[in-house]
Image (cartoon, rainbow, N blue to C red):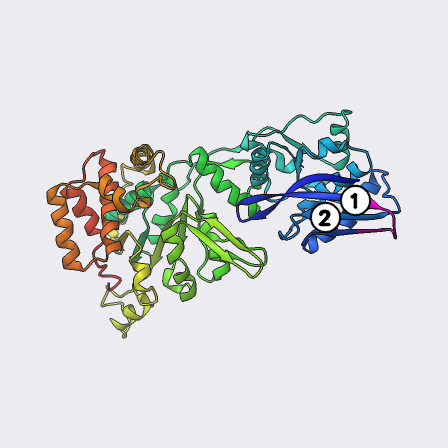
Amino acid sequence: MVSRAYTVAFQGVEARLVEVQCAMTAGLPGFSIVGLADKAVSEARDRVRTALGAMAIALPSKRITVNLSPADLPKEGSHFDLPIALALLSALDILPDDITQNIVALGELSLDGTLMPVVGALPAAMAAATHDRSLLCPAGSGAEAAWVGKTQVIAAANLGDVVRHYTGQVPITPAEPGEVPLIAAGRDLREVKGQERAKRALEIAAAGRHHLMLVGTPGSGKSMLAARLPSILPPLTASEALETSMIHSLAGLLDEGGISRSRPFREPHHTASMAAIIGGGRHARPGEVSLAHNGVLFMDEFPEFTRTVLETLRQPIETGEVMIARANAHVKYPCRFMLVAAANPCKCGYLPDPARACARVPACGEDYMGRISGPLMDRFDLRVDVPPVSYTDLNLPPSSEGSAEVATRVAAARARQLTRYSGQDGMSANADVSGDMLEAIVSPDTEARNLLIRAAERFRLSARGYHRVMRVARTIADLEGAAEVRRPHMAEAISFRLPDPAAGR
């Protein structure tokens, strides 16, 4: 007789159902696990045997075979311990077979039977709900998984509690969702002295999820501005929080057992590898672009990143997803993020200041910014020169307008966009729109369209640049609450697209 339990195997953010089959047959005693299992899964036999022994349950002197079906799907991770134990308990007639077949289980077993938290509880709960099953997981993962709300989540502390629950001795109360409170931003735009144009660009970028490039001399405030971007971003919607948290769950970043409504803000160092930025490694884990999904990816010292890393950003920026191709797997992750890049205008950093610039001016600026290819630079919707702050501005009192006031306008603009794109798959902000729909939602008046055409001819904008100007103009109109894109909106959008004097382009 074959007993069965169920668990999941992860392929990106998708959790695929895996049937754990256990058979005990006559023959030379042994315990084998088959079904394309990796080292962590193969070692489960020793953890499971010892954990059962701690409960005074001895395995019989028979040939025990555990098959993980489908057999051609790679199985990775220690979360297979618990479903294998359930299949064995069913084969030993300790747990009813009809109960184990209606559970999706995941969890790592310690040698004394304690269930250790594992990554991926949230996508596993989604898979359980899809297949109309309940989820069994470690106590440390219950609050995370219960947030799905579409299936019952039983979070047990140890294997003994699991047996007592499913045999009716000591029932476990279903887990309750745990939500991490919205983290108040500690950095306020009010602290930034001067840089009014850069702050305006930050507001527009946040309102439409546009990519932003900041170029300026060292100490001009580029990093300071970017660090205050989270303070003006609206909270994640329920669907966005679920999407983002599923990725963070796979990466093991939901360490507080709940779902965060704050938008991700990732800032990798410029020495990060391509696998760290795009994703990959031995288990094809999500990279920084996916961890920044629905949030911000801030890349300081942008030209210092390797050319390979920078060029691999081009496709994710356009499509909003990244495919990690490996010999044994092809994994897709969503990565709809807002890219904010900061750069010095040259290697020495003082290209615009003749008194402080090096002897290689202007060649040093051309060489340094030349590390950013034209196609990649063309993908930035807004390009801003961040000049040094004057000492007069530094002595001024804080601005009367801070992050709270800007965040209110940004939230109102985002709300208009959510209403506009409701029912449109993959669209939530102006940055997502293209094709005929872009023409329909922008619909500039005659003066605005003529201005855009003249600017496109004068500055030789690419087709991509032309459409990105239209998107930015639509966002500026949304910030004002205007139904139609007019000439002032278009003029401001074009001004952020002009060749940057500091960048030499």
Q: Is residue 125 magenta?
A: no
Identify which residue is drawn at 10% across, 44% down: 447
Quadrant of the rendering where the C terminus is positioned: bottom left
Q: Residue furthest bottom?
A: 359
Q: Amino acid at mark 2?
A: Asn
Q: Position of residue 285 (x, y in %)?
A: 54, 53
Q: Which residue is mark 2?
A: 67
On screen, residue 355 above or below 128:
below
Q: Earlier in the sequence, mark 2 or mark 1?
A: 1
Q: Is residue 193 among what the camera can see?
A: no
Q: Position of residue 48 (x, y in %)?
A: 77, 45
Mark 2–mark 1 contact, CB under 8 Å?
yes
Estimate the spatial distance between the alpha carbons at disc 2 and disc 1, rounded to whole Å.
Answer: 9 Å
Of helix, strand and loop, which one carries label 1? strand
Q: Amino acid at mark 1?
A: Ala
Of helix, strand and loop, which one carries label 2? strand
Q: Which residue is mark 1?
A: 23
Residue span colored magenta: 24-31
